[in-house]
Amino acid sequence: MNTVWQRARGGVLLGAMLILIFVGALTKSDLFTAIGVQPLKPLYSDLIAILAAGEAQQAGLDPYAHNPLDPYNRPHVYGPWWLVTGDLGLVRGDAWWLGSLLALVTVVTGALLLSPRSKASWCAAAALLISPPVLLALERGNNDLFVMLLLVGAAWLVTRRNWFGGMAGGGLLLIAAALKLYPLAALPALAARATSRARALGWVVVTTVACALVLLTSWATYQKVAAMAPEPLTIFGYGAKLSYYVFLTIPEERMWLTLGTVPVLGVIGGMAWRYRSALWHLVPTTGFEAAGYLAGALAWSLCYVSTISFPYRLVLLLLPARLWLKDGTSRAARLQLITAIGLLWTPCVKEHLLVLSADESQFTGAPIAWLALGGEHAVALMLTVLLVVSTMGWGWRRCVSTACDQGID
């Protein structure tokens, strides 16, 4: 028996299925709509926006103003490091191969990251990887995919035994933070390196200082970007402020929203309390699974609290998913896994139940639609709480517990 194939076949089949569905949806856009994805023309439109900003700078235009080179006249709303595309000579015409390469690398990385070994874990991995937010990010060529890849690379490198891995992992995290800012929340993941507590915390501090110095060199630009960055105050976003917006600006539907919210909060909250000890001890103190979990959980939690979580940002949940699938016997892992799958598939539900106005300021639907929307906000909130609790448990054991001073459980 070929043991290599037995170990790898789950990931290979998972990646192949995602590629087939993605290519099939590109040729028949109704498949995108059925899954809950609203495709934009042209393909890889978010990637085109990045390339257009680089082109604009090379042409002497202000990329942070409305950009006539972009098909939607979008200004550049990211850090200055993305503008290197113009220095490299990349133009909008390169989007087709860059977007396809980004999609291929995402598929391969996602399959390797999840690495399902059983039928049950394969089904769960498929529900995570072949989900509306991932397909949306692939279709748009969204730069959150690139950030996710950097975080995966940082988590893997920093947990290698050699000193170069630690440096390279910190460097990738620095690049991710300079590109999108929110990966700054993932800095504690560097402490998942198997070394003493003092050395681990020292490496986090050193990398934090390096990130601060990099950001300070273009601080005025980052301030401008922060002021320009759009908030997802539509049914397609997630976050504390959005939940406030939905519940308080639609009083006529508040009863249905509440009826959808309360049961979800009660069920997941009750299970979280029951499994509180398992949640606290879910994340191992060191290792790749720990680093990936922390990077994804902390980055997502910051985006949720800041209400900058568009649907494609749910790709960050692929990082903690490796631990969920590996630790299949833990009730805490199963609770987080099921909650995450539920959240990843809510775009499909919303697509078929709610109707959005042309300016995305109003949405209408039957009572069942408002029940579903209320439930979705409750799931997003509870998943964030679960991730934070497990992260706090890791922090306590890694930074306070004397049993973990040498970087081992």
Image: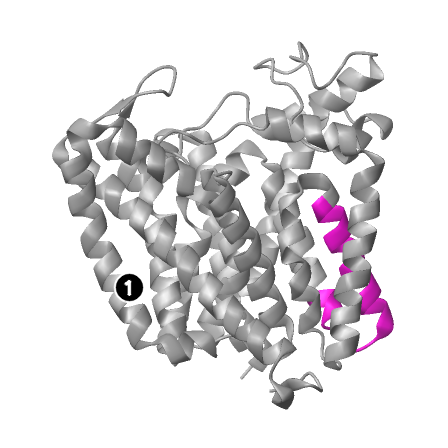
Q: Which residue is drawn at 66% across and 63% down?
A: 188
Q: Is mark 1 on a helix, strand or loop?
A: helix
Q: Mark 1 points at which residue?
A: 269
Depth check: 183 or 2 in front? 183
Residue 69 visible? yes
Residue 118 seen from this side:
no
Give residue 227's quadrant in the image: top right
Residue at 30% across / 33% down in the picture? 246
Residue 296: % across, % down: 56, 57
Q: Position of residue 290 (x, y in %)?
A: 59, 71
* The quarter of the displayed image where residue 191 is located: bottom right
User: Relative to residue 166, is residue 24 depicted above or below?
Assistant: above
Measuring from the top left, give residue 156's x and y in whole percent: 69, 66
Eyeballing the image, is 210 above or below 320? Answer: above
Q: In this view, does 12 lie above or below 103?
A: below
Q: Which amino acid does label 1 sit on?
A: Gly
Disc 1 residue crowd, few under 14, some 14–19, many 20+, Cα 10 Å: some
Q: Nearer the viewer, residue 175 or 1?
A: 175
On the picture, is 169 further left or further right than 132?
right
Q: Give the range drawn in magenta.
A: 156-177
Side of 237 relative to 379 (left or right) = right
Q: Position of residue 208 (x, y in %)?
A: 76, 56
Q: Does the magenta stretch include residue 157?
A: yes
Specify the principal SS of the magenta part: helix
Q: Residue at x 66, y 9 (%)?
A: 68
Quadrant in which residue 67 is drawn: top right
Quadrant of image for the C terminus: bottom right
| Residue positioned 34% across, 68% down in the render | 335
User: Magenta segment: does it hold 407?
Assistant: no
